[in-house]
Amino acid sequence: MNTDSTRPYLWMLVGQFAFAIMATLAHALKDYCGWQVIAVGRSTIPMVLIALLAWWAHVPLVIWGTRSLWIRSIAGSISLVCTFFAFTRMPISDVLTITNLFPVWIALLSWPLLGMRPSSTTWLAIVSGVAGVVLIQQPHIAKGNLASFAALASSFCSAVAMLGLHRLHGMDTRAIVFHFSSVSLLFSMSAKLFIQGSPPPNAPWQWITVAMLLGVGVSATVGQVCLTKAFTLGDPAKVAVVGLTQVGFGVLIDAVLWSRSFELPTVLGMILILTPTAWLMLRGGASAEPHDE
């Protein structure tokens, strides 16, 4: 087996496992602190680590930047806030499945933004994805939990952010990630200030809270670095499909750590989302850039 040919996929697997760890810690933190605090930690630690890496490599960081950079950072920040809200209120496998719907949104948004009209098979993929979301949402809506809509909004904003990345090819990845992390920190702090929620059952803070928040930030940084390496070394479409293993990691973690059993509608919903998502990625219907969570 050629090591060079498998290296991008190994980087992607490691990256997706790191993001699954991030999701696990975020879900577990719901008993210790609010989702806004988790989002602040997710933004702060990567921002500091990336700034240090950029300083070490003498890479100039961007504060103001271009309109495309701000669109990417703002859309990504909204996606991040919505994702962490959902992580504390839904099983992580459900959140990861719905947030990975972004290629469907990209295919749909490419029509008004890029003048690329979806084909009939692309419309079929879109309908399949929507049906999958409905199936996954049903048990949560029945319990009065509307967090799945936040996950859906996250996937839409991820698509907007990834479309914005097309115009940032000349900018260093570290500068892009630093700008995104800085803006997402502002969004997370604003959510903390202006969005009230019920206090977690294990408040006040404990040492485990700090440790898990550090874990969220470090695992997010590791995941982003691995994704960047994977997309740099391998075929973007194929590497992106390997990224769907994140959902598999989420299913396994839900089953092992939280003893979750999956009902048939949920399984069908996952299939209806992941199948067209993989197809759109393989045919190049989604952006080939790494995305943030």
Image (spheres, grey):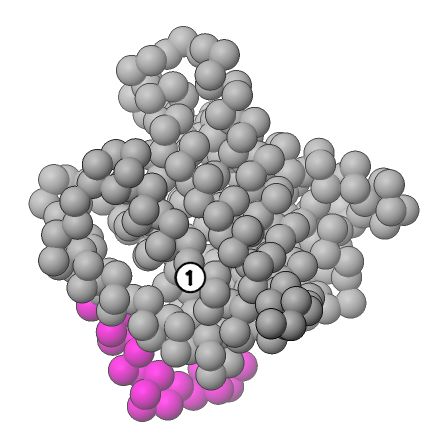
> Residue visible at 26% across and 61% down?
270
> Residue visible at 52% across and 44% down?
18
Q: Which residue is at the front of the view, 125 or 183?
A: 125
Q: Which secondary structure is most common in the magenta stretch? A: helix
Question: Residue 84: percent from the left, percent from the top?
Answer: 41, 39
Q: Residue furthest bottom?
A: 120
Question: Disc 1 residue type?
Answer: Leu
Question: Residue 218: percent from the left, percent from the top?
Answer: 60, 35
Query: Compared with residue 151, is residue 279 higher up or lower down, i.e. above or below?
Result: below
Q: Residues within 10 Å of mark 1 (few under 14, many from 20)?
A: some
Q: Which residue is at the front of the view, 104 or 63?
A: 104
Q: Is residue 116 magenta?
A: yes
Q: Is residue 31 left or right of residue 55?
A: left
Question: Residue 134: percent from the left, percent from the top?
Answer: 18, 60
Query: Compared with residue 65, is residue 2 higher up or lower down, i.e. above or below?
Result: below
Question: Residue 227: percent from the left, percent from the top?
Answer: 60, 57
Residue 163 shows up from this direction? no
SS state under label 1: loop
Q: Which residue is at the front of the view, 12 or 114?
A: 12
Query: Compared with residue 132, is residue 115 higher up or lower down, i.e. above or below?
Result: below
**Where the N terminus falls, by quadrant?**
bottom right
> Residue visible at 31% across and 83% down?
123
Q: Residue furthest right?
A: 58
Q: Residue furthest front?
A: 1
Q: Is residue 175 left or right of residue 255?
A: right
Q: Is residue 229 left or right of residue 21?
A: right
Q: Is residue 126 magenta?
A: yes
Question: In which quadrant of the rendered view does residue 161 lie?
Answer: bottom right
Q: Which residue is mark 1?
A: 244
> Residue visible at 72% across and 56% down?
173
Query: Compared with residue 5, is residue 228 higher up or lower down, i.e. above or below?
Result: above
Segment tinted magenta in the rendering: 110-131
